[in-house]
Image (cartoon, grey):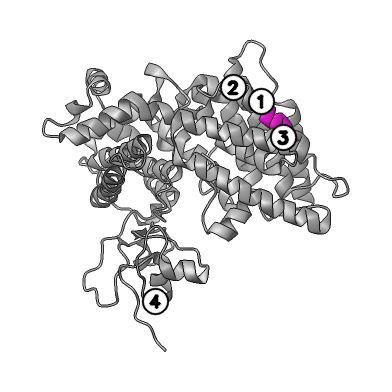
Amino acid sequence: MPHKRSRTGCLTCRDEGYKCDEAKPHCGRCVRLGKTCQGYGLRVRWKTADSSTDAGRIMKKRSPRSKVGAKPLATGSSSWSSSSPEGAPTTPSSASGSSGTGTDPSRSSSLMRNPSYVSPDISPMNRYLLHHWTGSLAGVISMASGARNPFLVHLTPMMHRSPALRFSISSMAAGHLAVLRGPGDGDEALRTLSSRHMLAAVSSLRASIETEDPALSLATILMLQISDRLFNTDSRIDHLAGARAVILRSGGPRTWTGDGAQFLLSLCFYHDVMSSISRTSRPLLSMTNVAPLEGLPSLAKLTALVSVVSAISKMQGQSGEAHQRRGAAIRRDLDSGFGIAADGDPAIEHTIQAYRHAAVIYLYRVWSDDGTTPPPKPFHAERCIHHLLQVPVASSFVSAHAWPLWTAGCESVDPYLRQLVLERLKAMYRNRHLPSLGRVQRDMEEVWVAKDTQRLQFGTENVDCCKVILNNRHREADLV
C-alpha cells in the first residue's frame, strides 16, 4: 500500500514515507519500531563540482508539489564565476587585507570590549548573546586565553561585515547559555533562539556566498561546524564540504595568506582531520605546511603531529607493500620525532604526548607491523590518559583533549582507567558546559559494551570505536 510522504515529521518518517506523530525528542513510530529517529529540521547539502544541480540546493525537504526551488549554494572550484568589484577573482588576501580580517585595529579592540558596536540597532538580547561570546564562550573553545584568543582577534571584528557570521556566533552563544541555565530556567526559549539564529545564518550565507569575501564565508561555515559538534545540533549539513568549496573557489590553500586567513585554514585543517577519523575516511582537503593551530607558534609541534594523524587517515582501506612501508615510517616518526621539551609549557607538552600516543593507537587501526603480535594499544591508552590527567582541567589546552581522551578511553580495558576517563569527562563538562562532552561519555560506554561483548565471545576484539557510532547512531563521534 503506498504511503504519502510526511512533510513535517521526523527525517526518518519523511524518508520512509510514513505519517509521523512528531513527538519530541523521538517520534512514536521510531520508538515503537526500534528505529533511529533522525530528528527534525533542515536537510542541507553542499554542491560539489561533480554533483547535479539538485544536489546543491539548500532548502527544507519539500513535497513533489513544491513549485519553487532554492538557489544553489557554493559549488566546487570549477563552477565558480563570481568576482570582486574590480573584476579580479575574490581571494582572502585581496579582500581581507594583510590580516585576513580587513578591520581597523581600533575597531577590533572596541568590538572585543563592547559587542554592541557591531550595529547601533542590534537588539538587547543579541547584545547579550555577543557579550557572552566575547566574555566566555570564545575562551571555552580556544586553546589560547585572554587577548591572544584568535577567535576574538579575528572573528569578532568580522561580525560587523557578515550577518551570517554574527548569526552563527549568536546561535552558539544561545545554545551555551541554555546549557548554563539548565532545565526550567528559560533554557527552551534559548534553544529555540539558537535554532532561529542557526537558520538565519544558513539563509544569510546562502544569499551572500557568491559575492562576499571568502574569508567571511569560511568563518561562518566553520562556526556552524563547531556548533554542530559542540552543541549536538545535528543539522545534517556537511559543513566541511562547504569549507572545501570556498577554499578551492578562491584558488586553494596557497592563496590564503593573511594572519586571519591562516587562522581559518588551520581551524579547517584540524576539523577536517578529526572528522576524517570519525568518518573513517580520507580528509577532504590535502594541506601541507599548515600554519600552527590557532596561529600560536607554541603549537607548531602539535600541528605537525596532527599532520601525521592526517597521513594515517589517508591510509584508510589500503594494503600492500607500500602501505606497510608507510605505516612503519609513521611509527618510527611517532617514536622519535615528538619528544618532551624540557623548557616547554607543561600543559602543551603533555597535550602533545597524549596526541602522540593516541596517534599510535589510531595507526594500529589501519595498519599492523607484522600481523603476529597484538598491537600495543592498551599500553598507549594508559600513557595517553596519564598525560591528559597532568593538564589542569581549567587549562585552555583541554579544549583539544576530546580526541585523545576518546581514543584512549575506548581502548581501555582496566575498569580503573575507564573510571578515570569518565571522571575526567565529567570534570571537563563542569568546567565548559559543552553538550558534546556528555555525548562522548555515552558513546564511549556504548563502545565498551561492544568491545566487552566481542572479548567474551571470542577472547579478543577488533572493534573500531568510530564505526560503532557510525553503525549504531548513524552519525560521527564527537572528537572536538
SS state under label 1: helix
Q: Which residue is mark 4?
A: 18
**Residue drawn at the location 50% of the way across and 22% of the way down:** 394
Which mark is nearer the camera, 4 or 1?
A: 4
* Mark-to-mark CA distance, 2 and 3: 19 Å
Q: In the displayed structure, does residue 104 sit left or right of residue 41?
A: left
Q: Residues within 10 Å of mark 4 (few under 14, many from 20)?
A: some
What amino acid is at disc 4? Answer: Tyr
Amino acid type, mark 3: Tyr
Seen in the image, is 421 located left or right of residue 461?
A: left
Vertical placement of residue 190 versus 449, above or below: above
Q: Secondary structure at mark 2?
A: loop
Q: CA distance from mark 3 to mark 4?
A: 47 Å
Q: Of the residues under marks 4 and 2, which one precedes in the sequence?
A: 4
Query: Which numbered disc, 2 or 3, marks the residue that appears first in the sequence?
Result: 2
Q: Which residues are magenta?
A: 380-387
Q: Residue 229 location in percent, x, y?
A: 45, 44
Instruction: Say which residue label 2 marks.
Output: 391
Could you tell me which secondary element the residue under label 3 belongs to?
helix
Mark 2 surroundings: few (<14), some (14-19) or many (≥20) residues within 10 A: some
Q: CA distance from mark 4 to mark 2?
A: 50 Å
Residue labelled with disc 3: 416
Outermost left residue: 121
Q: Residue furthest right?
A: 372
Name the residue type under label 2. Answer: Val
Classify mark 4: helix, strand or loop.
Answer: loop
Cα separation, mark 1 vs mark 3, equals 16 Å
Residue at 18% over, 26% down:
117
State the mark number for residue 387. Answer: 1
Rendered view: 343 above or below 418 = above
